[in-house]
Structures are given as structure tokens and as C-alpha cells.
Image: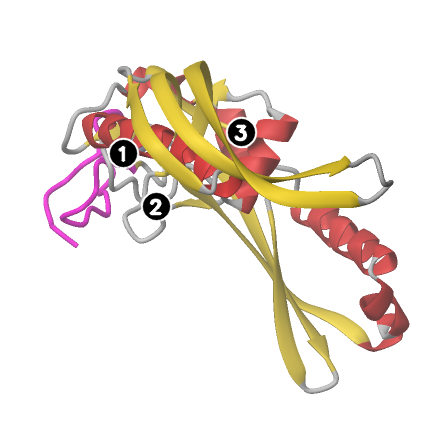
Amino acid sequence: MEAGFKCERCGAPLEVSPETIVAICPYCGFPNHVSGNLKTENIYIVPTIDKNAIAKAFWNRVERDFDLKRMKERIEIVDIEGHYAPYWVGSVHVGGDVEYMVREEECHTDSEGETHCHTVERHYHDYVDEVLNLIGSARRQVKSFGVDDIIHHYSKARPEGKRLLDLDEDQWGKVKLEILNTEMDETQAKMVMREDAVDVVRSRYSAKADRIDRFDVTADEPQNVALVLLPMWTVYYKVENSIFHTVFA
Ligand SMILES: [Zn+2]
């Protein structure tokens, strides 16, 4: 922790590490720009449900899980912890050419009624032209703009974010959760997004092709880039003498 950083709005001391890009004031909630390239007006927060609702969601999951349901009577919630984690979201246009080969089995029946099969190599040429919606952690230890549970959840549910600067004191009182440090600024996030967008396309072709002959796909500058704070809850529960935990987004 470096001394000397104070909230721009209320003057409260801020906890800032060398990696901090934006520090959310624990008192008034103001997003203070500490380092890097970032527009604080582009920070969004997704409101969370409360602890009781998380407990309810946990018991619902127990009901729906065959193994957990059988030991329901022996399960006890020990603790529920929540925090906000920062994610960069944006859309990236990818375009280019891919040439690839797929081995396929081809069969035909001859005049004697016998079936002959052999493997043929089919060649394809695709033109890639699409927009990918990406989300990735703004924290260094958890990267990946491509695949993740939370990405899946977020892109499916598309929760309505609210601009952080628009939250009033009343709403801040409800947030109450710790907000994890943002460690990647907008310039860095955009760079990673472009790399990951190309990787998403590449892995799609690696999965379906037997050989990629040409891969010439590039990503444009990411659009609609915003920092989103997403609520994450961890439920710790006990079964006999063992403690387990499960995460809710
Ligand atoms: Zn403040």
C-alpha cells in the first residue's frame, strides 16, 4: 500500500497498490483514476442481489443436484462472502481468410452391391467477417477474454449495468461489497482483446480442421469498451467435517 492517495471527491484515504489503475473510494464510492489510460465515466456496475437471496440460490442448487440433494440434511452454510471484480468488455471486428483441410469418409456402392469407403481430403476457403463480444478480467492473475464461466453467464444474462458515477449514496449503501483492484488499463485491455479475438477464431478452426493451410485473420480496434464491475459470491458450506465452497456470479 502506497501512502498519500486520497479520494478526489471526499478526501478519504485510498488503498492503492503499484498495480492499481482505478481505486474505488470505500466511503463515497467515487472511482478515482490512479494510473494508466482509463475514462472513469465508462465504468459500469451490475447490481447484486443480497446475501439472503444468494443463500436461497444455494439451496435451490442443492435441490437440483442429485448428489447434494441426498445429503441435504447434513449441509450447513458456514459463510457467504461477496465482492465485485472488474472486467473489461468490448466488441471486436475480425476479418480475413482461412484455408483449411478436413478429412472426410466417402462411401459408394458398386454394381455388385458392395460398399467401398475411403478418406478424402476436402479443402475449404472461408472469409471471416464478424463482430465478437468479449469480456475479460481487468486483473492480471486472471486473464482470458475468451472462455470462462462468468463470460458465459454475463453474455447470456446481459445484466443491465449502471454507470458508477450515476449511483447515488443510497445505492452505494446497498453495494457494500469490497471492489477488487483494476490492474489493466484501457490501452492494455484493448491490446489483449485484439489478440484474444484472433485466438477465438483460430481455436474455432483448430477444432474443426485437420490442417490449417492459411490463417490470415486480423482484429480491428475494439469498440464500445467499458469497465464493468460484476458481483461474485462465494458460499462456504460444511458437510460433516469438510468445508466446500461454490461460486455464484
Ligand atoms: Zn470518497
Q: Using the image, determine if residue 130 lies above or below residue 235.
A: above
Q: Which residues are magenta?
A: 1-23
Badge 3 marks a residue whose secondary structure is loop
The residue at 23%/29% (across/down) is: 191
Amino acid identity at mark 3: Val
Q: Disc 2, ligand 1: is the CB inside 8 Å? A: no
Q: Badge 2 is on which residue?
A: 143
Coordinates of residue 192 in the picture (x, y in percent)? 27, 34
Amino acid identity at mark 2: Lys
Q: Badge 1 is on which residue?
A: 192
Can the viewer see residue 166 in this picture? no
Distance between mark 2 and mark 1 Cα atoms: 9 Å
The residue at 56%/45% (across/down) is: 149
Coordinates of residue 77 in the picture (x, y in percent)? 71, 67
Tell me which numbered mark, 2 or 3, is placed earlier along the sequence: 3
Left or right relative to 91: residue 40: left
Q: Badge 3 is on which residue?
A: 46
Distance between mark 2 and mark 3 Cα atoms: 20 Å
The residue at 33%/39% (across/down) is: 138
Picture quarter with the N terminus: bottom left
Frontmost of labels 3 and 1 is 1
Frontmost of labels 2 and 3 is 2
Depth check, front residue: 43 or 157: 157
